[in-house]
Each structure stands twice: as structure tokens, then as C-alpha cells.
Image (cartoon, rainbow, N blue to C red):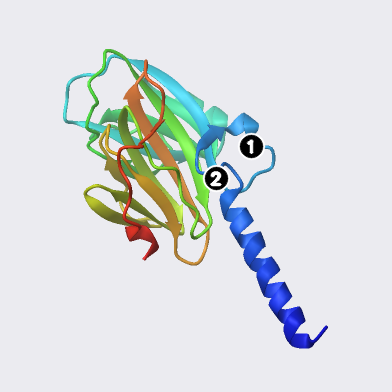
Amino acid sequence: MTARSIVLGMAIAAGAATSAALMAQTDGTCIPVSERAGREFGCFIMAREELGPLPASPDLYWHLDTYPSKAAAAEARSARGTVVESLGRTWLFTIAAADYRPARGTRVARVGPLPLFKAQNYAAVYMEGVFQPGMASVVHRHPGTEAWYTLEGSMCLETPNGKFDQRANEPGFLVPGGVPMELTGTGTSPRRSVVLILQDATQPRSTPAHDWMPKGLCRS
């Protein structure tokens, strides 16, 4: 076997391994963190909090604060607050008015205002997304607002309204309920984000959106 054929074989094998890695993990869907089973990449559901009715107000935000321990976060937790351990940090995620601030803690971000998908009762689903560049979600929609805050890397979201990019530590962004979307990891390093879906508590968290086909704007 010549040196050239060896190099070519190695390149083909590497390409196949990369494709397999991008297709593996969670297959573009979100799974409970209890089923992670050592997977590094994918989308993992960290917590689901029943919120009950919410005020019909344009002044609801997702507040992201960190604490040194779960006990400290739990002590500061108030109504509509959830303690989550994700991406190496202990978080207190809270759905509250714009001026809300918990006791102590370190403020990381505030995302909103959050448009509400009409419902009698709401749930907040918190997730962790870790995508290699080129990994993509399935095309889907939610019965409520989805919001993101990216801590590392970058991501691109395509909806019928075009594409939207988010890089680490930029302001969070969101998509209203019912809008079809496809999410893709971009850049040169893994994208790591925390995610909120504020949804109708009686509906499935996510459904495939077979009625819309992305144009591949995030892949060009």
C-alpha cells in the first residue's frame, strides 16, 4: 500500500467518524439528562417546573443567576424559580418581572420579554445544548417560547423569518411558540448553551415541523 493510499484511507475514515459523531449523540432531539449515559454532545433536559397560571403581562423575563452550591441557590429560590446544575455551574433560573433580583448570587443574564403562548397552566423546561460545529437539531416547534443563552461557541437558528446567530455571552434571544425552527452549531469549537421552553403545561414539549423545510441558511 502506497503512502498516498494510506493517507487517503485515513482521510475517508476520519470523515466517516466525523459524520457518525454528528449524527450520533441524541439524534438532533432532546433527551432527559438521566439518559445521557456518557454522551458529551446533544440536547439534555435538566429540569421541568410546573408554574401554574401566569399573569397576562408583557413584563416576564428569564433571569439567570449562579451560586456556589445547590444549597445556596435553593435558599435564594423564590416563586417560579428552579435550581439547575448545568455546564459546570449551579444556576437559579427564575421566570419573573424585569426588575426581579434574587438574594445574593451572580447575575449572568436576563432574557426577554417572553411572549406567552396562551394556556391555563404553564411549565418551564430547562435544557443544556452542547453541539459540535455542524450538528443540527431536527426541524421542530414548541407550544411556547424557546429562549437561549450561549456560554461557549456559537449557534445559528433558522426559522421562516430568516437566520439568527448567537455567540458566547451575547444577549439571549428567543422564538415565539408555534414557529418552526432548525438549530445548528457553528464556529470552530463546541457550542454550549442553556435553554428555556416556557410552554403550555398540557402539551408535548416539542413536535416535528413537517410543514416547513429550512433553506440551509445556517450551513452556507
Residue 63's quadrant in the figure? top left
Give whichever of discs 1 and 2 has the lower sequence position.
1
Left or right of 1: which side holds 123?
left
Q: Amino acid at mark 1?
A: Arg
Which corner quadrant holds the C terminus? bottom left
Residue at 41% in and 23% down: 204
- The residue nearer to you, when weighing 49 against 209, is 209
Residue at 33% in and 25% down: 199
Left or right of 175: which side holds 185?
right
Q: Amino acid at mark 2?
A: Gly
Left or right of 52: which side holds 113?
left
Residue at 49% in and 45% down: 129
In the rendered image, residue 34, in percent from the top left (x then y), is placed at: 63, 30
**As drawn, 1 above or below 18:** below
Residue at the disc numbered 2: 42
Mark number displayed over residue 36: 1
- The residue nearer to you, when weighing 66 against 119, is 119
In the rendered image, residue 15, in percent from the top left (x then y), is placed at: 63, 66
Q: Are marks 1 and 2 in contact (CB under 8 Å)?
A: yes
- The residue nearer to you, when weighing 154 against 219, is 219
Crowding at dot 2, Cα within 10 Å, few <14 / some 14-19 / many 20+, comes out as: many
Q: CA distance from mark 1 to mark 2?
A: 9 Å
Label 1 element class: loop
Is residue 198 visible in the rendered image? The answer is yes
**As drawn, 149 above or below 144:** below
Label 2 element class: strand
